Amino acid sequence: MDFQDQTLTCRDCGNSFVWTASEQQFYKDKGFNNSPVRCPACRAAKKAQMQGGFSGGRGGNGGGYSNGPKQMFAAVCSNCGNNCQVPFQPRLDENGKPVKPILCNDCFRSQRNG
């Protein structure tokens, strides 16, 4: 199949950019089914944002690290019964009990330090 240069519009900045025939061949060779939606500059900016400023690695969201505060969830410690905040959404069974034990900071530290 012969490819021809196409002019596309960037989703982010609204500017036109050329999707070259060689880029289209690259996309086909890689098995990509969709044409790009961002111009090269916005694509690079989006990639840098998704990598969280880290170089290398697996991409994604910067290896699980973000610059913002972590969302905390209310829970009850399975060990001491105190109310606490945990950095994950506790999974509950049909009776509203945690599927896995949830520990407050104090109980977590004491268990961890043995």
Image (cartoon, rainbow, N blue to C red):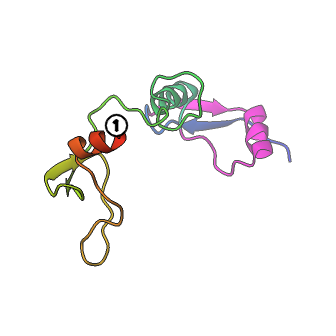
Does the magenta run of residues contain 75? no
- The answer, for residue 72, to whether it is visible in the render is no
Amino acid, disc 1: Asn
Residue 58 occupies which quadrant of the picture? top right
Residue at 27%, 51% in the rendered image: 103
Residue toward you, 34 or 62:
62
Residue toward you, 11 or 4:
11
Residue at which label 1 appears = 113
| 22 sits left or right of 114 in the view | right
Residue at 22%, 47% in the rendered image: 104
Q: Which structural element holds mark 1?
A: loop
Residue 99 placed where, x, y %?
A: 35, 66
Query: How dense is the environment of label 1, judged by Cα within 10 Å: few (below 14), some, or many (20 and up)?
Result: few
Residue found at the very far left of the displayed protein: 82
Residue 20 placed where, x, y %?
A: 72, 32
Residue 24 occupies which quadrant of the picture? top right
Residue found at the very far right of the displayed protein: 1
Residue 77 placed where, x, y %?
A: 21, 55
Residue at 77%, 45% in the rendered image: 28
Numbered label tally: 1
Q: Quadrant of the C terminus?
A: top left
**Relative to 66, residue 80 above or below:** below
- The answer, for residue 53, to whether it is visible in the render is yes
Residue 52 occupies which quadrant of the picture? top left
For the record, the magenta segment spans 14-37
Residue toward you, 16 or 82:
82
Residue found at the very far front of the displayed protein: 114
Residue toward you, 78 or 41:
78
Does the magenta run of residues contain 18? yes
